[in-house]
Amino acid sequence: MQTIWITGGSSGIGFAVAQKFLEENWRVIISSRNEDKLKKAVEKLKNKTSKKEIFYKACDVSKYNDVKDTVAYIETDISKIDIALLNAAAYSPNRTQEFDIENYNLLIEVNLNGTINCIDVLKNYMKDRNNLISVVSSPVGFRGMPTAGAYGMTKAAQLNLVESLYFDFKKLKINISVINPGFIDTESTKLNSFKMPLLKPPSYAANKIFKGLTGKYKFEIYFPFVVVFAVKIMRFLPLKIYSFIWRKLGNF
Ligand SMILES: NC(=O)c1ccc[n+]([C@@H]2O[C@H](COP(=O)([O-])OP(=O)(O)OC[C@H]3O[C@@H](n4cnc5c(N)ncnc54)[C@H](OP(=O)(O)O)[C@@H]3O)[C@@H](O)[C@H]2O)c1
């Protein structure tokens, strides 16, 4: 039986991915900050799947010692990690479009420092195993979008980080990949103030992520194709056309 550790596994995409991997007979460990939420998520997953190989460990990814203790606990008391899905994130769109330094600092702490904390600890366990670390980024990182300065900056940085580590981690025999989901209906996206084309349920994301992570190695997993490919193309549009699109989607 193979093992996946999912950060931010108590809700949204992480929870749906946990369910999918359990259904496919993987051993699953979910982490997030709130222990009560994690306990409830584990009960729900046991009821939904009738599987027992589901564990939890509270872990704030922005705290290095939490990450160190969690990975040590999983690797020594449960199992070696075959896939680490670094999915935890803070999301707080700045609807007023006012520059809020506290929000920038929070998102850097969780999305960026949280990711590098996990990678730093995991690399010591996972080296020479040809296992996989996959980071959930976002197409929001492809090009600056209104209200998303702080969030988009951290997602762009995650993408750049994985692009770089792809080369460096080859030497450690650790595979690394990135996941760029389109709009998925979770607590986070309920905070958005603009229309979200092709909004999909978390189960859709979970199926795509399962297929992408367990099939032949792919550097980037993205879905739905139409939405994410359109955002990829938007990177190259002249600013006038790019602004026009945003005026159509919201009051920007
Ligand atoms: N939903 C989308 O449309 C979409 C699109 C593109 C990319 N993404 C990415 O997909 C991932 C999951 O997003 P989601 O929409 O499923 O979000 P979500 O439903 O809000 O879930 C976020 C999860 O992260 C956990 N979390 C937050 N801060 C944490 C911290 N400091 N340490 C550990 N866990 C923490 C939360 O639990 P606690 O609060 O209990 O810690 C929760 O389990 C994120 O990386 C997001 O950027 C989402």
Image: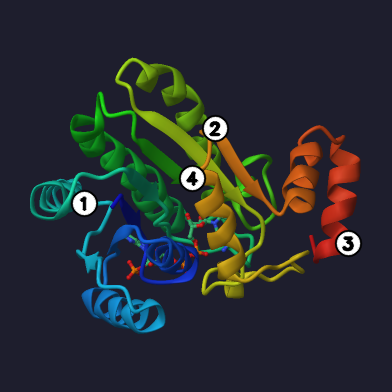
Mark 4–mark 3 Cα distance, whole angstroms, equals: 35 Å
* Mark 4 or 2, nearer chain start: 4
| Residue in the foreground of this view, choosing between 224 and 121 | 224
Q: Are marks 3 and 1 in contact (CB under 8 Å)?
A: no
Q: Amino acid at mark 3?
A: Lys
Residue 46 point in image, percent of width and height: 32, 79
Residue labelled 1 has its Cβ within 8 Å of some atom of ligand 1: yes
Residue tagged 4: 213
Q: Are marks 4 and 2 in contact (CB under 8 Å)?
A: no
Some atom of ligand 1 lies within 8 Å of the CB belonging to the residue at label 3? no
Q: Percent x, y for residue 222?
A: 63, 46
Front tag of 4 and 2: 4
Disc sitting over residue 63 in the figure: 1
For label 3, the residue is 248
CB under 8 Å between discs 4 and 3? no
Q: Nearer the viewer, residue 146 or 135?
A: 135
Q: CA distance from mark 3 to mark 1?
A: 40 Å
Q: Secondary structure at mark 2?
A: loop
C-alpha separation, residue under disc 4 versus residue under disc 2: 10 Å
Q: Which mark is residue 228?
A: none
Residue wearing tag 2: 219
Q: What is the CA distance from the residue labelled 1 to the residue labelled 4?
A: 27 Å
Amino acid tagged 4: Leu
Distance between the alpha carbons at the discs numbered 3 and 2: 33 Å
Q: Name the amino acid type tagged 1.
A: Lys
What residue is shown at x 27% (from left), y 29% (from top)? 129
User: Disc 2 or disc 1, which is closer to the eye?
Assistant: 2
- In the displayed structure, 234 sits above or below 99; it is above
